[in-house]
Image: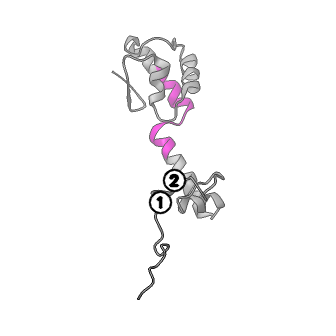
Amino acid sequence: MARISGVTIPNEKQVWVALTYVHGIGPKTSYDILAKAKVDPITRTKDLDDSQIGRIQEVINDNYDVEGELQRIVVANIKRLKDIKAYRGIRHSQNLPSRGQRTKTNARTRRGKKVTVGGTAKKVAAK
């Protein structure tokens, strides 16, 4: 099993697909990495030798932010927006959509389970 950037990538998949298991690498980036490392994208991960894995790891380390480093950068960017009280930062701190989506309806994944407000039912007249 090959490990790239601290992630064990699957053996039976083609290399370009297996690289997408690393956080921060998508299909396009995967093809670019393999082109720079001079590795055929359709070879299986189990067929790679140590020199090819080393070249892929070297290209990733030199040119891309992946895994924990990328996640730290994203968290720092969101914290910066919150600190300067930007609109997007306020939306992040309130757990609301920050990219202009509607919130009157929908947005349930961001806002959580619907909470019914009490006191909306009609009261029965007292005798």
Up-down: is 70 above or below 118?
Answer: above
Q: Is residue 61 magenta?
A: yes
Q: Which residue is mark 1?
A: 114
Q: Nearer the viewer, residue 126 or 109?
A: 126
Q: Nearer the viewer, residue 121 or 117?
A: 121
The three-letter amino acid code for the residue at tag 2 is Arg
Distance between the alpha carbons at the discs numbered 1 and 2: 7 Å
The three-letter amino acid code for the residue at tag 1 is Lys
**Where's residue 94, x and y in %?**
54, 63
Q: Nearer the viewer, residue 4 or 24?
A: 24
Local packing at callout 2 (Cα closer than 10 Å; few below 14, some 14-19, many 20+) is few
**Which region is colored magenta?**
55-71
**Where's residue 87, x and y in %?**
65, 61
Q: Is residue 117 left or right of residue 80?
A: left
- Identify the residue at the far front of this view: 127
Q: Which is nearer the N-term, disc 1 or disc 2? A: 2
Up-down: is 73 above or below 105?
Answer: above
Residue found 33% across the figure and 21% down from its top: 1
Residue found 46% across the figure and 79% down from its top: 123
Q: Secondary structure at mark 1?
A: loop
| Marks 1 and 2 close (CB-CB < 8 Å) | yes
Q: Quadrant of residue 36?
A: top right
**Where's residue 113, x and y in %?**
45, 57
The label shown at residue 108 is 2
